[in-house]
Amino acid sequence: MLNDLFSFQYGQGFAIGFTSMQFWLFFLIAMIGLALTQKNHLMKTIFFTVIGLFFYFKTSGASVLILIFSILLNYFSANSIFKAKTEKLKKVIMILAVVLNVLVLAYFKYAFFFTESFNAMFHTDIKALNYFAQWTSGFTGKGSLVDRIIVPAGVSFFTFQSISYVVDIYRKEIEPVKNFFEYSFFITFFPHILMGPIARAKDFIPQISRKYYLDKDDFSWSVIQIVKGLIKKLVLADYIANHFVDKVIDTPEAYPGFLGIIAMWAYSLQIYGDFSGYTDIATGVARLMGFKLFQNFDSPYKAINVADFWRRWHRSLGAWLRNYLYIPLGGNKTGGWGTYISTFCIFLFLLFITQWYALIFIYVGITCFYLLGILVIPNFTKYVHRDLNLLITMVVGGLWHGPSVNFVVWGTMNGLALVLYNHWKKVSPYENNTSKLTHFWKIFITFNFITFTRIWFIMQDNGAPMDFLDHIWNHFEFSGETFLKVLSTYQAVFIIMLCGFVVHWLPKKIKNWWEDRFAKMPMYAQALSVALIILMIYQAVSDESRGFVYFSY
């Protein structure tokens, strides 16, 4: 175990995952280092930079050089912006820095995707080469990566975080850090470097210089978060995935169609447990070290409409997209050439790369509606700009998740839903209805719509989502006998699903009551409770260990 942790081997089997014993040994070393360097600010920032880079190396190997390049690029770009004498020069440097960040992200994450799309569009045969792998192979003597571009772990997260730092300095919302290692600490802080939450410099960096402080309430809160995260990941997400979801999704033709619907409900619970489980552990670990990270989830399946859902799900990404894309495009007030050019590019993109033509027809229909509205309705332009900016933001959010046509379709469907909801809520007789029945149906419709769109999220092959829907439609085959057989076969899975949904939908005051009760327990009772819970978790976990879903994004 120690050999695996301290060796310079990396990749699958050597990454320091949150659910492994190696991580908790690594975390113990981090806490010891924090204690030893607490009184020396420079040593603390250097120490955490080194262990952050090592943590990243254990996952991505030579890709740590890309992370180091990103740190250097944005640190010196931000300083140059701050020192520039004219606003024009500041803007030029900021734009160059953002473009370079996007190019690095685009090359390593989207090169194959855009090359294949271009080849399909224009019938060419252009190849995407991994020049970085060729260069590193010259040092390592290995050429296994030359034929493909490997996506660096967490590249979307640390790139967005870096862009926010540069742009915030250009906007004069913050000043540059006092020394290089404060910035490298901010980027490489190991609890959030791989999967977020995406932190803003103005929220995180001031915490670096604060004196370490952890009271009993903070300790209790941290332990609760970590235990919740382990339960969500190991019991909820992994068990459901290994014993049910993967089986149905991989071979849907072997199961009746109605089971496909249940599998997608299960997948919504799985992905929530997986991603929110990670961020629970990340925020808990960070708080034990004296740092507060963004709370990434707020009971998203309690959402009563699609807009409410996106205020509750992956909140740090939503905040980033709002602050650095939606508002710069004009937000809900105005638009410009960026809005129209981006809209046209999305239309061409959908036209050439997706086979789901209904989406294109809807897109074209909305565009025609806007053009007609501009001609006949006074002040209608502001609604056009708002809707187009929102649609662009959601398509980019879809593409952020990965280089796949299906992610673009998923983002577009959610964008269209947000656009339609913005208009529907103005005429809906149920918008302000607070009855329990109405509230239930709002949650039910929202959850099922989000679950439906995730068919394009879970299935990466082009055409696979439509084949899956076709199977559900043509082979529904529901009967009491079939249902009872399914229920007996997957009894444990359905019990875990039921418990997961019930706990998720419990009123917040009940959850807070349990957390308060735990916080008031004596330390020895807390330790005993946690030990028993963790013992039960590892007794119940699946035999097959799984990585975190968002690790690949």
Image: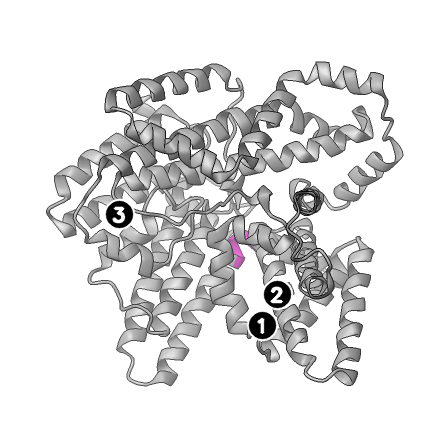
Q: Residues within 10 Å of mark 2 (few under 14, many from 20)?
A: many
Q: CA distance from mark 1 to mark 2?
A: 8 Å
In the image: residue 106, left or right of residue 74: right
496 within the magenta span:
no
Examine the rendered structure and indicate whether residue 459 appears above or below residue 97.
Answer: above
Mark toward the start of the polypeptide (1 vs 2): 1
Q: Secondary structure at mark 2?
A: helix
Q: Which residues are magenta?
A: 106-111
Rendered image quadrant of residue 433? bottom right
Residue 280: image quadrant is: top left
Q: How is the image coloured?
A: one colour
| Residue 58 screen position, x and y as percent | 37, 36
Residue at position x 77%, y 84% in the image: 375
Decide: is 85 above or below 154: below
Q: Residues within 10 Å of mark 1 (few under 14, many from 20)?
A: some
Name which residue type carries label 3.
Thr
Marks 1 and 3, how far apart in space? 40 Å
Amino acid bearing label 1: Asn
* Circle 1/circle 2 CB separation < 8 Å: yes
Which corner quadrant of the image does residue 348 belong to?
A: bottom right
Amino acid at dot 2: Leu
The location of residue 144, given as percent across then percent down, is 51, 39
**With respect to residue 77, does 29 lie above or below?**
above
Q: Nearer the viewer, mark 1 or mark 3?
A: 1
**Would residue 325 be found to the left or right of residue 225 on screen?**
right
At x 45%, y 51%, the residue is 157
| Foreground of the two, 334 or 255 | 334
